[in-house]
């Protein structure tokens, strides 16, 4: 009876083991980036889909390589990846009066080519930028070693074209 249970485990265990090996082989260990997909309301989703259509093929000299999972709410360029996520929630720092007054060491408000951004350090040497005064919040993560001003310049015209000025819902 023990040998039957052992044999049943082997027959069931082997396919599970093979599936585990295949799944591990298909993971993002190949260097492709991943990004959490936001879940905005219908209005912001439509704006973000419009943004996806006009995003540049190249940012800061890096070709577009979208992160996984695939979504019209996320985009990426290069390796290490510059990641754009559209339809994110409003960052808490956006409501902090210290940021607006320039008294916050971790966040700064500013603008590039007609698009206002909140800049925050990401803790890994890079920066996270979130659009301000637009109908949908667009977040751009720029890894350490990338020229963040070049990234924002490259993305500004697409943001202006697809995401109207105003206050996000």
Image (tube, grey):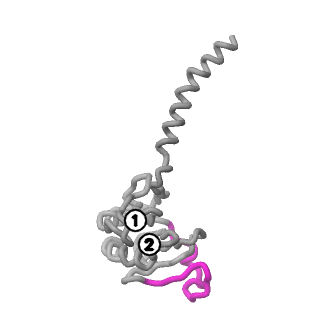
Q: Earlier in the sequence, mark 2 or mark 1?
A: 1
Q: For mark 1, does the 10 Å Cα neighbourhood hold few (<14), some (14 to 19), or many (20 or more) residues?
A: many
Left or right: 13 as drawn, with respect to 34: right
Please name the residue that numbered disc 1 is placed on: 44
> Which residue sits at x=34%, y=62%?
49
- Residue 135, x across and y down, in percent: 40, 72
> Which residue sits at x=44%, y=66%?
82
Does residue 55 show up?
no
Count up the numbered dots.
2
> Which residue sits at x=68%, y=10%?
1
- Residue 137, x across and y down, in percent: 45, 70
Q: Are marks 2 and 1 in contact (CB under 8 Å)?
A: yes
Q: Is residue 92 magenta?
A: yes
Left or right: 3 as drawn, with respect to 55: right
**Range of magenta residues:** 89-111
The quarter of the picture where residue 61 lies is bottom left
Q: For mark 2, does the 10 Å Cα neighbourhood hold few (<14), some (14 to 19), or many (20 or more) residues?
A: some
Does residue 10 show up?
yes
Secondary element at image label 1 = helix
Q: Quadrant of the C terminus?
A: bottom left
- Residue 22, x across and y down, in percent: 49, 37
Please name the residue that numbered disc 2 is placed on: 168
> Which residue sits at x=65%, y=16%?
5
């Amino acid at each position: 009876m023990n040998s039957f249970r052992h044999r049943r485990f082997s027959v069931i265990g082997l396919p599970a083991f093979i599936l585990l090996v295949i799944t591990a082989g298909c993971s993002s260990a190949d260097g492709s980036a991943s990004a959490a997909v936001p879940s905005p309301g219908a209005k912001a989703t439509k704006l973000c889909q419009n943004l996806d259509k006009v995003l540049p093929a190249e940012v800061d000299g890096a070709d577009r390589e979208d992160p996984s999972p695939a979504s019209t709410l996320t985009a990426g360029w290069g390796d290490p990846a510059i990641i754009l996520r559209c339809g994110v929630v409003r960052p808490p720092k956006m409501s902090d009066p210290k940021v607006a007054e320039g008294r916050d060491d971790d966040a700064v408000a500013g603008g590039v080519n007609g698009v206002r951004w909140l800049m925050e350090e990401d803790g890994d040497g890079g920066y996270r930028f979130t659009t301000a005064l637009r109908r949908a919040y667009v977040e751009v993560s720029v890894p350490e070693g990338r020229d963040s001003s070049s990234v924002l310049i490259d993305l500004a015209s697409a943001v202006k074209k697809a995401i109207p000025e105003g206050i996000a819902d």
